[in-house]
Amino acid sequence: MLKIGLTGGIGSGKTTVAKIFELLNIPVYYADAASRRLYHTNKELAASLKKHFGNDIFLNDQLDRARLAGLVFNDPQKLDLLNSLVHPLTIKDAEAWMSKQTSPYLIKEAALIFESGSNSGLDYVIGVHTPQELRIERVINRDGLTKDEVLSRIKTQMDEEEKMKLCDFIIENNEHQLVLPQVLKLHDFFLM
């Protein structure tokens, strides 16, 4: 079974592309959703988060993601610490999930595939490329963040152009090219 990574910067449309693969009956692992689940189900992770970021990042046993984001997206050391706590657990969780799949190929959707090193266990990586201004607009509309907040998050991620150079395939999601035919072409390729 082929293991395919799907990555792109914040607001690039990774999730939209992943949903198309799901419509084609391809299983998709969503790393961000998995990490949110692990925040609440992994007691060691929750304890580490409280130890390093304070007990007040949890309200009624629920992670206050906005509070945690406020702490880490303005402090590269804190962001690195958070990633060092979460990435190994998410990678292990993804590997367990992948071992249970039976389809011809699967998709692992993650913004930080290269940054986390999880690309080493994948056969191919698809990058979703979107111009930065469009990404900013999408995130402002989706999450209600300010432009400065979005730019702060973009700065924490690998440069989009550098990331795309590392990818084996690129889907252009720029509102000028249709995404569906690009996904279908890759789907046919992975089934060969």
Image (cartoon, grey):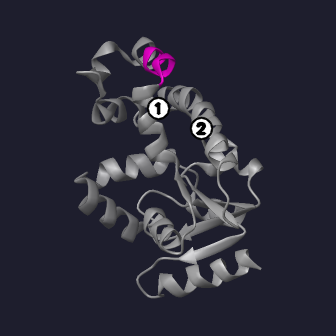
Where residue 35 appears, as percent x and y from the top left, is 47, 38
User: Which residue is depicted at the point 35% across and 62% down?
Assistant: 136
Percent from the top left, x then y, of residue 179?
49, 81
Comparing 168 with 181, the one in front is 181
Lower position in the chain sequence, tag 2 or tag 1: 1
Q: Which residue is mark 1?
A: 38
Q: Which residues are magenta?
A: 42-48
Q: Dot 2, crowdedness within 10 Å: few (<14), some or many (≥20)?
A: some
User: Circle 1 sits in a helix, a strand or a loop, which is it?
Assistant: helix
Could you say which is closer to the camera, residue 56 or residue 27? Answer: 27
**154 to the left or right of 25:** left
Residue at the image point whose x is 52% and y is 47% from the top: 31
Q: Which residue is mark 2?
A: 93
Q: Is residue 43 magenta?
A: yes
The image quadrant of residue 63 is top left
Q: Position of residue 9 (x, y in %)?
A: 50, 58
Identified by mark 1, the residue type is Leu
* Element at label 2: helix
Marks 2 and 1 close (CB-CB < 8 Å)? yes
